[in-house]
Image (cartoon, rainbow, N blue to C red):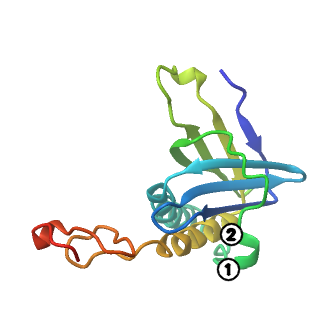
């Protein structure tokens, strides 16, 4: 089994996309001191993570009513990923955990299996961050995802700049 990557706590964590809408590659990146961890993920994973983070933080606040609310503020200039953009692996699964003693949220990222890889051969990264850091990542992730291609009002599929063949319009270009 590869040794799990663990940054506790991260100095910064973010998500970003590189490329033109429709051809973008999404990343999650965290760093601590001079160590940078970059992972490839899907846009839908970023969107699902954002929803999950809000639900998870609400659950934490319910169980720990004495905690101050996590800030949702972020500085866009600081949320872009930094070189090197050399991903360690492609994310297959995401999970969240919480350490109440340290008041830290763990973002656990498991590698997407390729070919005949066994589960114990897959990479694992555990990135510990503050509740405000994970909320900022979630809010920035929603912003980044929304900057993609416009969605067709008829079929809900993304439209390329030249349009697309809409199934609801019986295949006619929209």
Q: Check disc 2: other Cα within 10 Å, few if <14, some if 14-19, many if 20+.
A: some
Q: Position of residue 173 (x, y in %)?
A: 21, 73
Going from N to C along the chain, the mark reached first, 1 or 2, is: 1
Which one is in front, 158 or 120?
A: 158
Q: Which residue is mark 2?
A: 132
Q: CA distance from mark 1 to mark 2?
A: 8 Å
Q: Is residue 119 above or below residue 67?
A: above
Q: Is residue 34 above or below residue 17?
A: above
Q: Position of residue 164 (x, y in %)?
A: 28, 70
Q: Is residue 170 left or right of residue 97?
A: left
Q: Which residue is mark 1?
A: 73
Rendered-image quadrant of the C terminus? bottom left
Q: Residue at x 72, y 62 (%)?
A: 81
Which one is in front, 72 or 35?
A: 35
Q: Is residue 25 left or right of residue 127?
A: left
**Which mark lies nearer to you, 1 or 2?**
1
Q: Position of residue 36 (x, y in %)?
A: 80, 50
> Label 2 near label 1: C-beta < 8 Å?
yes
Rendered-image quadrant of the N terminus? top right
Q: Check disc 1: other Cα within 10 Å, few if <14, some if 14-19, many if 20+.
A: few
Q: Residue at x 47, y 72 (%)?
A: 148
Q: Position of residue 113 (x, y in %)?
A: 50, 30
């Amino acid at each position: 089994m590869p040794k799990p990557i663990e940054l506790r706590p991260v100095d910064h964590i973010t998500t970003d996309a590189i490329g033109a809408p429709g051809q973008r590659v999404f990343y999650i990146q965290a760093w601590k001191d001079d160590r940078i961890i970059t992972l490839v993920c899907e846009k839908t994973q970023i969107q699902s993570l954002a929803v999950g983070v809000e639900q998870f933080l609400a659950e934490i606040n319910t169980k720990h009513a004495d905690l101050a609310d996590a800030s949702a503020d972020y500085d866009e200039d600081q949320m872009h990923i930094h070189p090197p953009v050399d991903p360690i692996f492609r994310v297959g699964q995401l999970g969240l955990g919480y350490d109440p003693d340290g008041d830290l949220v763990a973002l656990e990222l498991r590698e997407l299996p390729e070919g005949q890889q066994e589960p114990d051969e897959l990479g694992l990264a555990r990135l510990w961050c503050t509740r405000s850091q994970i909320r900022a990542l979630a809010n920035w992730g929603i912003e980044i995802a929304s900057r993609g291609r416009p969605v067709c009002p008829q079929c809900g599929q993304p439209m390329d700049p030249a349009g697309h063949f809409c199934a609801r319009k019986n295949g006619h270009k929209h």
